[in-house]
Image (cartoon, rainbow, N blue to C red):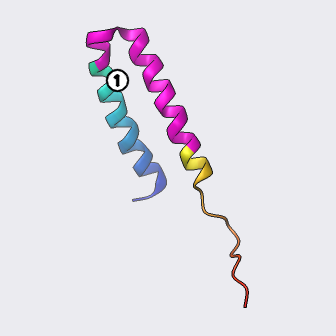
Amino acid sequence: MNKWGERFVIYTALAVLCGMTAAFAGTAAALWSFLQVLAVIELIYWIAQPTTKSQAKG
């Protein structure tokens, strides 16, 4: 699965969970939770990207 497919699955599951949160805590809380988790996921993807150049010596 490519990175866009992985993100789609993750964000779909996150949207479902936040939708259930909206039923109990309200729409604003669910939206804020979705945005916070989305930002953390994107930050992790951005930080964890492999470098494009190989650093192997020898």
List the single residue furthest toward the bottom. Answer: 58
Give the residue drawn at x 35%, y 44%: 9
Q: Main secondary structure of the magenta part?
A: helix
Question: Residue 27: x, y in percent?
Answer: 38, 10
Q: Is residue 42 magenta?
A: yes
Which quarter of the rendered picture does the C terminus lie within? Answer: bottom right
User: In the rendered image, which residue does mark 1 sit on?
Assistant: 18
Question: Residue 56: x, y in percent?
Answer: 69, 81
- Residue range highlighted in magenta: 21-43
Give the residue drawn at x 48%, y 54%: 3
Location of residue 42 by image quarter: top right
Q: Is residue 55 magenta?
A: no
Drawn side of residue 12 relative to residue 42, left or right = left
Which quarter of the rendered picture does the N terminus lie within? Answer: bottom left
Give the residue drawn at x 71%, y 76%: 55
How many marks overall? Answer: 1
Q: Residues within 10 Å of mark 1 (few under 14, many from 20)?
A: many
